[in-house]
Amino acid sequence: MCIFSAVFLVEFAIMKNVPLFGDDYFFASFAKFGSAEFWQAHINHYMTVHGRALVHFLVTVFLKLPHIVWQIFGAALLAFVVCLAANLFIDDGGESELGNLCAALFTAGMIFSLRIDMTHESVYWLTGSFNYVYPLVLLLLLWNLICTKRGAFLAAILPILAFFSAATTEQNAMMTVGIILIYTLEPKIFNRENKKAKRELVFAFAAAIVGALSVYLAPSTFIRYGHENDVGVFANMVRNISLLYFQFTFKKTNLPFIIFTLLSLGAFLCIRRRGAAFKLLALGCAASVPLVIYTAVSFVGVWEYGIIDCIAFVSLIAIPSAAVVFGTLLKERPKDYLIAATALILAVGSQIMTTVSSVFGPRTMLCGVLMLTIFDLSILKIACRGKRLQAAAAIFGLIFFVCGFAEAVKTYFGYKENYPINALNEAAVEEYKKDPSHELILYKLKDESYGWSMPYNSPYHLHYFKIYHGLDPSTEIKWQD
């Protein structure tokens, strides 16, 4: 509980310095409408702009409230991600306190380790947090519910939760359907059970399909894809697969998680598998760590032979290692193996589905990073059964947590440095509205990494920035550094 509370407090400290960004200004315009116009605006948005009706409705509701409400809620969402992810591994019987500590440290470290090039798109602004963090909370809550013993009440809740989880975003819809399908089919495939699937899982699967279709088949989805995709589906996929593979595995954005994955694969192979070939693979995983670091630090947009060689070597080690571990899980089926197998399937699947889109980036990797961390933690728990191994894993988790905390502190100071500029601009706008005879001068952020789609970079968001502040759309604004 102390670790989860620490996550909330650290994230709330960051959120306190996060103002409105990007689409926040667009959705805030909905709050200015009356009741009938408010609902009509949502209908129009769903029909012509975006299919994430549930998510965007919640965005507009929170934009009607004082900003501090979202800042508290946004920090709570991240703490819930940690709590729910760790709860998949925590031993309720108390037989493994070190294992419980390890789960909490690694999941908290994962949140803290998220770099700003991912979080400024997906976490640290109101609309982003509802599009990328809120869906994960619902997904993890559903997963926990599936893994627990359910009475009549929880069984009745399961389909409802499945619908709302799937009706959030495209990636979350796929993962929601995937989790339910895996847990429904697993007993029949591996245990050869002839009895019917549990009724609540069947109902949940049907509800998840309905929720997913509400996103995938929204009229706006086809309109949006037609506007964004100008080179064709196949050409998009060919281009995006290589870009995605490099961005996910060999850039600084996901460096801590890739290192964690390589070390976890190596530990599993070394401890759980016998034979020289598996020991060599484990050694290769360890040797891949400095190569991944070199590639992430050295790559600046120019493909050099050294970087290509590093990527080839790591790929030849990591992919077979992951395949061997996955095969071992399916063959031996140790306790908690299904969590590991499901997490790996969802990590890969959630990223592959983005290749059909022309718009993807660090923000669409967030769910993949979470699933990869759950997979790593799963195989570590399976491999480290003795107290000595659990103690070693806990020390590793503490190092991961401390390094992640350092990244969170860096993020805090980045937003804290920018925040006074927002207050200065707010005051300047209010002063201009009292006396519009003088020129309106506003200031740019000191570091745009700690912000998202600023009005001076986006004419679209500038238009809604003016509406939000009650300015005439023709108002000229001079932006200064």
Image (cartoon, grey):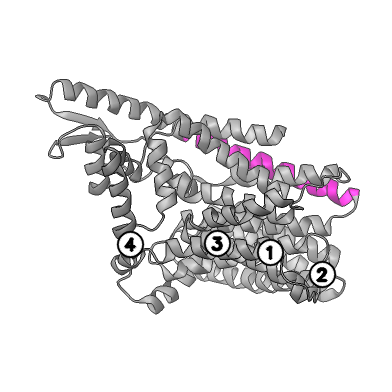
Residue at image mark 2:
279
Q: What residue type is labelled 4?
A: Ser
Residue at image mark 3:
208
Q: What residue type is labelled 2?
A: Lys
| The disc label shown at residue 220, or none | 4
Q: Which amino acid does label 1 sit on?
A: Arg
* Mark 4, secondary structure of its residue: helix
For the residues labelled 2 and 4, the Cα–Cα distance comes to 52 Å
Q: In this view, does 259 lie to the left or right of 167?
A: right
For the residues labelled 3 and 2, the Cα–Cα distance comes to 42 Å
Q: In this view, does 59 lie to the left or right of 186?
A: left
* Mark 2, secondary structure of its residue: helix
- The percent coordinates of residue 328 (x first, y second) are 79, 71
Quadrant in the picture for residue 478: top left
Examine the structure image and report whether residue 403 is included in the region drawn in magenta.
yes
Compare marks 3 and 2 and give the one earlier in the sequence.
Answer: 3
Depth check: 284 or 468 in front? 468
Compare marks 2 and 4 and give the one earlier in the sequence.
Answer: 4
- The percent coordinates of residue 40 (x first, y second) are 28, 48
Do the CB atoms of the residues marked 3 and 2 lie less than 8 Å apart?
Answer: no
Q: What residue type is labelled 3?
A: Ala
Quadrant that contains the C terminus: top left
Residue at image mark 1:
199
Residue under the image location 74 percent in, 47 percent down = 103
Q: How crowded is mark 4: few (under 14 residues within 10 Å), some or many (20 or more)?
A: many
